[in-house]
Image (cartoon, rainbow, N blue to C red):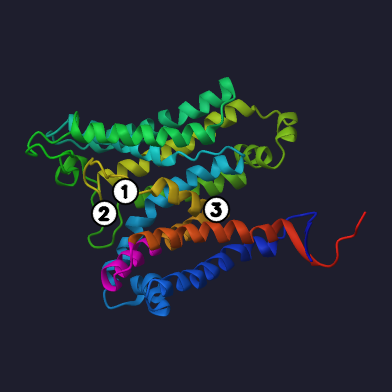
Amino acid sequence: MMILEKRQQPSPIWSLATPVLAVILTMICGGLLFATLGKNPFETIRTIFLDPLFSEFAWYYRPQLLIKGAPLVLIAIGLSFGFRAGIWNIGAEGQYIVGAICGAAVGLAFYPANSALIFPLMVMAGALGGLLWAMIPGILRVKFGTNEILVSLMLVYVAEQLLASMALGALRNPEGMGFPGSRNLSQYPSAANLELIAGSGMHWGVVAAFVAVIFAYITLSRHVFGFQVRLSGQSPRAARFAGVNPGLLVLICMGISGALAGLAGLFEVAGPAGQISIDFNVGYGFTAIIVAFLGRLHPVGILLAGGLMALTYIGGEIAQSNLGLPGAAIQLLQGMLLFFLLAVDVLTHYRVRFGKVGVA
């Protein structure tokens, strides 16, 4: 019989090997899934994971890695602060949406003015919108002891309804002949998040993602706040003895994750998406949870995991176009990645023994 025996200390070897093994298992089971759908599993896996990097059209796909990966990394970095401290913000998708709405609203309020101050104001509005939306579950937990998982998740659906309302009402393009959606911000120079280097995929959202990775690495490894975050996650009782204010820590971590998710929404709506629309959100807030755990809640790991997840997005689109693969199969593949990551992660904290169970 297989017995799980708890380790005295988490295994550093398994901690590093877990993400790699999870990716391999995802490829194997994904291949079996594609085979049941009547697709060549080897061709499909190659299309998803290799074609965006090495095909004849890689010159077009590679910049998309930055465009797709930036919001994932930005949101996941924010979530990692709370997850490390045992604070579970599952509603980053809602904060992403509200940040986009607030940022776009500021840009559209100044239309058609031409000023270098408009985009910085949009950035501040996007961060503030995401922060305030994240404060709702944060304050409710601190003041009333509510579960931030449920509250933050339910607020996603509120944010989606707010998005639909804005696309059909207050932010609808008055020159759009009644169609839902705002003006195209990418065609409004003062509010556009354009590429900094033509054809590179590099825009201000990518820059912000790299800055967030550096900020998180320094904060978590060198600053006293990072020590408090780690200590609270490992031993809440010891953290209280060390003088950590648990309520304040909840608010700060929720605020950081909300602000970064709001920034991701602003950079997306002012750049790649271009406008507020009913279907603006594409699940980045939820996918970022996978990215955070796949990266082991470490800033550098999150950067690499964000690139991998962006690869599945782009490769999935290629597979849908070239191989006729259903879009739901790609979402299932991404879900498999989180499933196998959590399953294999058991070996980080437990070792497997084989033997007989004694009878009392």
**Could you tell me the amino acid type at mark 1?**
Trp
Find disc 1 in the rendering and name its residue. 204
Q: Which of marks 3 and 2 precedes in the sequence? A: 2
Foreground residue, 300 or 344? Answer: 344
Find disc 3 in the rendering and name its residue. 293
User: Please, what secondary structure does the residue beneath circle 2 have?
Assistant: loop
Question: In the image, is residue 339 above or below residue 252?
Answer: below
Residue at (54%, 45%) from the top-left corner?
80
Q: Position of residue 285 (x, y in %)?
A: 42, 45
Any mark on residue 136, and which? none
Foreground residue, 320 or 185? Answer: 320
Q: Quadrant of the C terminus?
A: bottom right
Q: Which of marks 2 and 1 precedes in the sequence? A: 2
**Could you tell me the amino acid type at mark 3?**
Phe
Cα gap from disc 2 to disc 3, whole angstroms: 30 Å
Any mark on residue 196, and which? 2
Q: Quadrant of residue 46?
A: bottom left
Q: Position of residue 322 (x, y in %)?
A: 27, 73
Residue at (42%, 72%) from the top-left corner?
36
> Is 250 left, or right, of 51 in this rendering?
right
Q: Position of residue 254 (x, y in %)?
A: 50, 34
What span is colored magenta in the figure? 310-326
Foreground residue, 336 or 247? Answer: 336
Foreground residue, 151 or 110? Answer: 151
Dominant SS type (magenta): helix
